[in-house]
Amino acid sequence: MSNQYVKSTHEYFPDYCDQVVRGITSLGAPFEVKTPHIVNNPLNWVNTLTGDYNPGWRDQVKKGIDATTHYVASKQELLAERCKVSLVTSDVNGLPGNFREYAWDGYPHYGSSPSVSPPTAAVLSNARNLALRKFLQRINEARTSLEGGQAIGEWKETVHAITNPLGALKDFTVNHVLRAKKRLRRIKVGGKELQDIQRYRNRPPRSAALAHAIAGTYLEFVFGWIPLANDVKAAVAGLLDRYDQPDHKTVSAKAIVSYAESAGDSTLFTDEFYSAVQYRVNVSSVNYRFKGNIQTGAVNGIRSVNASLGLLPEGFIPTVWELIPYSFVVDYFTNIGDIISSFAFQRSLINWGCRTVKIRTETKFGPVHFRRLPFPGDYYPAVRRLLKAEARGGGANFSASTVERTKLSEDNLFPDWEFHLPVVYKPWLNMSALLTQQFCSLF
């Protein structure tokens, strides 16, 4: 007997609208033209879910057993607000009291049922890598309060920062004063005055030395003092809280990446001079989520000192990578650091886990509003006048999505290789400081 089940739900939305054109002609004759269901677009669809039975999943979860079952679902939704639209104009010339009204009551034409626009392999890989990075970070946060590899790698710079605070700026100031005193002493000799002045003129400009000092001070502050303060804070918090820790913890992380975005207008009707329109936006996205129950390393609610300080075996290989000079610059352009961290991660720490991928395509319709059509000169006011323009409602959210959940395997915990350019200013600022130091050191 199959353990698989299928659920189906039939959905319906009456996408329709009535139109009435009424008024009094310029000759005084009343008229009314009704067009019932000028929009007649009934929508039908079926939401489905296919999965596997596992009646005892609650007991399995309590015992730390993987109870994840596979399921696939597809769903469409339409949430819409009924619209009422009225546009009243009159002839400038003609019998007083003449008017013409366009009135709509119902729903605009929302088109056919949406379908999911599949993402490219690059988009799917990007969402997966982002979610996996967050997932492994949160597992690390659940096991320790401090990244030990980072602390060990920065120990030398930390000691230097404490014993020689703002060393680059101090060296620049002290050396500048010493050089100035030396020049003054030589000038007093007399015969060497011209020679010393000429030698001083041939020295590298002070602006280069100043730039070198500023760049060094910035790097010392960013990569020395800030990490030191954060590490001390995390270490104190971890040591204080290590007696009240769960032995097991459920963690999750997700990443949402959008793609295939587009926008445009949908026109309901036009009365020669005005149009009733809606703004329409289409966007597709990937929602990638990892979830699992992990062993925190605590025993009977107590976490060891080493664990609290981040001195864990899985941190050794990432520490070696961080100790390589300028490895952080490589991480700006590739995800080598993430690959190394994933390679060193202990898969046995995960009691159970699942991966859920949701792909969604959504169309948003804005409220109905009016737009005047372009005409040369001022032709419209010369022949017609606007008496009333009223529009309410019409906004809608129309979406289609597919969801798949699977068990977490070892392959799922290894990121895809990627190359990218930094899109925020901080990496470029750090690299500029490094280049400034290297360039100024040539003088």
Image (cartoon, rainbow, N blue to C red):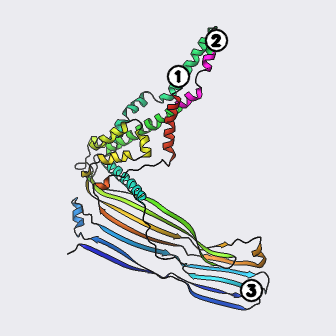
Other residues around mark 3 within 10 Å, as few (<14) / some (14–19) / many (≥20): some
As helix, strand or loop, the secondary structure at mark 2 comes to: helix
Q: Amino acid at mark 1?
A: Val
Question: At 33% from the left edge and 42% from the top edge, which residue is drawn?
Answer: 318
As helix, strand or loop, the secondary structure at mark 3 comes to: loop
- Residues 209 and 138: in front is 209
Q: Quadrant of residue 351?
A: bottom left
Give me the C-alpha separation between circle 3 and circle 1. Answer: 90 Å
Sequence-wise, which precedes: disc 3 or disc 1? Answer: 3
Disc 2 designates what residue? 193
Q: Is residue 433 magenta?
A: no
Q: Is residue 202 left or right of residue 334?
A: right
Q: Is residue 79 left or right of residue 408?
A: right
Q: The C terminus lies in which quarter of the figure? A: top right
Q: Amino acid at mark 3?
A: Asn
Residue 242 place in picture, x, y as percent: 29, 45
Disc 1 designates what residue? 174
Q: Which is the main secondary structure of the residues drawn in magenta? A: helix
Q: Is residue 187 left or right of residue 381?
A: left
Q: Which residues are magenta?
A: 197-212
Q: Give the number of marks.
A: 3
Task: Determine if residue 309 is in view.
Answer: no
Question: At 48% from the left edge and 47% from the top edge, which residue is drawn?
Answer: 422
Disc 3 designates what residue? 98
